[in-house]
Structures are given as C-alpha cells and as structure tokens.
Amino acid sequence: MKRCLFVILLFSLNALNVFAQGSASGCLLPDNKVYTNYSSLAGFRLYSSSSSAVLSNNYCSWTSASTAPCTVCFGTINVAGLMCTGAGAATVTGQEGIFTMVQCDLDRYSWFFGAAASLFGIFMIRKRDIL
C-alpha cells in the first residue's frame, strides 16, 4: 500500500512544474525562439540567428510588458551596412523586448491525475475483494 502511494506521488510530482522560470532579452519570432545576439548601427539592431533562447520544459509561450518591431537575419550580417547577406539569406520580422516564460495550464495534466485516481481505486477494490 505504501509502495503504491509512493509511486503515485512520485509520478504526480513529475507532472508538476519544478523548473525555474526563465527570461530572455531579444527578438521573439513565431517559432517561439528569442534571438539574443545582434549587431547595431545608428540605433538600428539586426539580430543574428546564431544564438537563441528556447522554451524550457513545461512552458508554453513567452510574454512581455512591451514590444517593438525587430528583424532577425538568417544569413551573414554585413556590419558596415547592417545588411543580411549570403546565399539564401533572409530576414524575418518579430517583436523585440524582455520576455518571460509562461507556464502551461495545469489542465494539461488532468488526464494523468484522473488515471492515477482510477488506478488507485481499482487497486483498493481488488484488495478488498469487492469485484
């Protein structure tokens, strides 16, 4: 009995979020990555696709108090003219700001708690020979 409760408790703690909340400063694109490395010229920033922050486990999206438009270069950045160059180079527009990770809803794990309660109920019924 104690072993069964320990296993259920162990799995339920695994489903809860125990990771620290993260934040990143940079340009957020629709792929849910915040690109952090940029080159600047005359107050204009062009972000590089070389480094980015991704969402940690159990986080669903990013949020920010305020944002402004920004551009990420998928190619080589020409610092002299602040242009995106190279074969197949492309720029993508996103939102610039300081972003904080948003936790997923606990409802996402409700099936797990229901299954654990069902298994516990079946275990108790079988132990008492009701079925």
Image: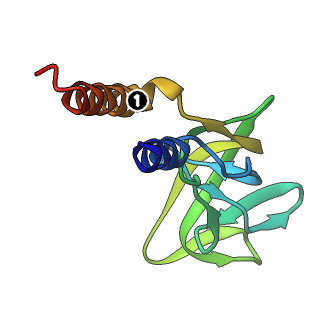
Looking at the picture, how far across and down is residue 24, in whole percent?
75, 53
Looking at the picture, how far across and down is residue 73, in whole percent?
58, 65
Callout 1: SS: helix
Which residue is located at x 50 percent, y 49 percent? 10
Name of the residue lying farthest toward the left:
131
Which residue is located at x 89 percent, y 59 percent? 42
Quarter-of-image position of residue 116: top left
Which sits in the foreground, 122 or 1? 1
Looking at the picture, how far across and down is residue 41, in whole percent?
84, 65
Quarter-of-image position of residue 44: bottom right
Q: Amino acid at mark 1?
A: Phe
Which sits in the foreground, 119 or 87? 119
Which sits in the foreground, 105 or 75? 105
Name of the residue lying farthest toward the right:
42
Against 7, residue 54 (above or below) is below
Query: What coloring was used for the rendering?
Result: rainbow
Which residue is located at x 23 percent, y 28 percent? 122
Image quarter where the N terminus lies is top left
Against 101, residue 73 (above or below) is below
Looking at the picture, how far across and down is residue 47, in whole percent?
68, 62
* Residue that mark 1 sits on: 113
Quarter-of-image position of residue 119: top left
